[in-house]
């Protein structure tokens, strides 16, 4: 962990079944409902995806997501992986990640903010101030 209220770790993903892609997963108690997954491109640029932590939890046990981010546990070459499908106007990718590594990341986030207790850590006053002080 990088601090008492956030967690970041790297997970290697596979793209196209064999090409490794480095990803950086982050969670912060300041944004308790979301996780950030950043993927390194072949030009060393990082592309970030922000999605619900509940979507990640659901996707680890069964197919989840209907929009730009879809997750599903699968068996690939005899090992359990988490398939992550991401889509935008700029492109589409289907990545495979080690299921246990992603589960470990989720577990670390629940040690910071337990699932179902996100609203106890969400600062609605700060959000309102940010929105109204544009």
Image (cartoon, grey):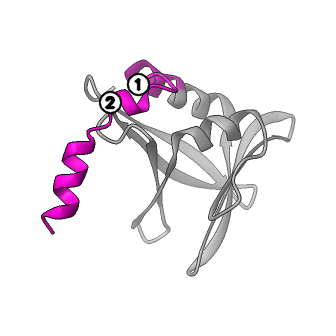
Q: Closer to the observer: label 2 or label 1?
A: 2
In the rendered structure, find residue 113 and report the number of the disc placed on it: 1
Q: Secondary structure at mark 2?
A: helix
Location of residue 24 in the rendering, given as x and y in whole percent from the top left corner: 44, 46
Q: Secondary structure at mark 1?
A: loop
- The single residue placed furthest to the bottom in the displayed view is 89
Query: How many residues crowd mark 1 within 10 Å: few (<14), some (14–19), many (20+)?
Result: many
Q: Residue at x 43, y 71 (%)?
A: 43
Q: Going by the image, does 124 lie left or right of 108?
A: left
Q: Residue at x 50, y 68 (%)?
A: 42
Q: Is residue 64 magenta?
A: no
- Tags 2 and 1 in contact by the CB under 8 Å rule? yes
Near-viewer residue (63 or 37):
63
Chief SS of the magenta region? helix
Location of residue 30 in the rendering, given as x and y in whole percent from the top left corner: 28, 38
Q: What residue span does the magenta drawing correspond to? A: 107-134
- The single residue placed furthest to the top in the displayed view is 111
In which quadrant will I find the N terminus? top left
């Amino acid at each position: 962990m990088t601090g008492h209220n956030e967690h970041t770790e790297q997970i290697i993903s596979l793209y196209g079944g064999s090409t490794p892609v480095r990803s950086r997963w982050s969670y912060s108690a300041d944004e308790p409902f979301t996780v950030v997954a950043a993927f390194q491109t072949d030009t060393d640029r990082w592309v970030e995806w922000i999605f619900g932590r509940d979507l990640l939890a659901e996707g680890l046990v069964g197919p989840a997501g209907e929009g730009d981010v879809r997750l599903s546990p699968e068996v690939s070459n005899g090992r359990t992986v988490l398939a992550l499908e991401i889509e935008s106007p700029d492109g589409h990718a289907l990545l495979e990640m080690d299921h246990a590594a992603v589960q470990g990341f989720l577990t670390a986030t629940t040690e910071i903010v337990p699932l179902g207790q996100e609203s106890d850590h969400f600062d609605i006053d700060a959000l309102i101030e940010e929105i109204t002080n544009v």
